Structures are given as structure tokens and as C-alpha cells.
Image: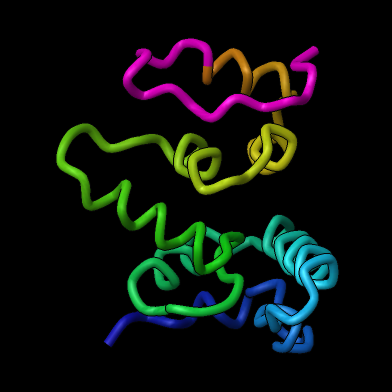
Amino acid sequence: MADTNWQVRAACRGVDPELFFPEPSDEPLVRTQVAAAKAVCRRCPVREQCLAEALERLPHGVAGGLTEHERRRARAQRERPGARQPRWLLLLDAGSSYSEVAAEYGVSVRTIARWASRLPSEQSAPTQGADPR
């Protein structure tokens, strides 16, 4: 059985679990709820462990900072043969913005844009509308 001691340090402890499981009835409300859940995840000291567990066994909701759709895409990326992608690129591929990734890594949006620009063309990151300056 996996060690779950990390869960006691999770930022979501004490937060209403419903926040992490939005109902797809009202699209603007879902976007707001997902953004709020991801904000909790961004400040979480055990986000990496949560994401690893979520990629292995959680089919629904927001966990590890990714929605179920984003985790599905990350799993597909992970299962493809070839070189392992850095986590920042997986986050971008899963739909995180340059701003979100920059905040997580403690760097500027421009730095993330620079990292993305150095990728080989067959491994390019999604383009972002934000000005990287």
C-alpha cells in the first residue's frame, strides 16, 4: 500500500471537497470553481505527491493541480514512448497557462516562454496569448 503520510500536509485539508468536483451544469461556474480548486493546489506543499497519486488512480475532479481531462492528457503523454518531458511542459500541455507555471516555479512568464522557445519543433509547447515580457 502506498505511503499516504503526505496527505496530512495537503493544502486542501479542511477545504470543502465539493470544490474539487465541479458539476458540469453551468460552464462559467465550472470555470470559476476549477480556478478556485487549482489556486488551492498551487499553494500546496505536497502537490507533486498528490499529482502522482491522481495520475495513478483518480478518474474525476481536480487533483494535483490538474482537472480530470488534463490528467488524461498527461497520462497519454507519459505513456508515449520516447524521452520523458519535464513537468513544466506537461503542465503546459495539460492546459496550464504560462502564468500558472511561472508562479509554481517562482520564475517570470518570460522565463517560461524562453524555456518553451528552446524546445525542438516536434516537442513544442502550446503557444500562449500573454506577452512574455
Quick check: is 64 in the magenta stretch? Answer: no
Where 116 sits versus 19, above or below? above
Please give the name of the residue rendered at 31% of the width and 53% of the height, measured from the top-left corner.
76
User: Looking at this view, is 21 or 16 the one in front?
Assistant: 21
Q: Quadrant of the C terminus?
A: top right
Where 14 sits versus 71, above or below? below
Please give the name of the residue rendered at 64% of the width and 74% of the height, measured from the top-left corner.
10
Count of numbered badges drawn on the protein: 0
Please give the name of the residue rendered at 39% of the width and 66% of the height, measured from the top-left corner.
55
Where 40 sits versus 70, above or below? below
Q: Quadrant of the N terminus?
A: bottom left
Indicate the position of residue 87 as horizontal and vertical percent values: 45, 41
Indicate the position of residue 85 as horizontal and vertical percent values: 35, 35
User: Looking at this view, is 99 or 104 the one in front?
Assistant: 99
Task: Kindly report the secondary structure that dominates the magenta region of the rendered protein.
Answer: loop
Quick check: is 120 in the magenta stretch? Answer: yes
- The magenta-colored residue range is 117-133
Q: Is residue 11 left or right of residue 77?
A: right
Indicate the position of residue 68 as horizontal and vertical percent values: 51, 68
User: Looking at this view, is 33 or 39 the one in front?
Assistant: 33
The colour style of the image is rainbow
Task: Report which quarter residue 96 is drawn in.
Answer: top right
Indicate the position of residue 69 as horizontal and vertical percent values: 50, 63
Please give the name of the residue rendered at 60% of the width and 25% of the height, measured from the top-left corner.
127
Q: Is residue 3 left or right of residue 97?
A: left
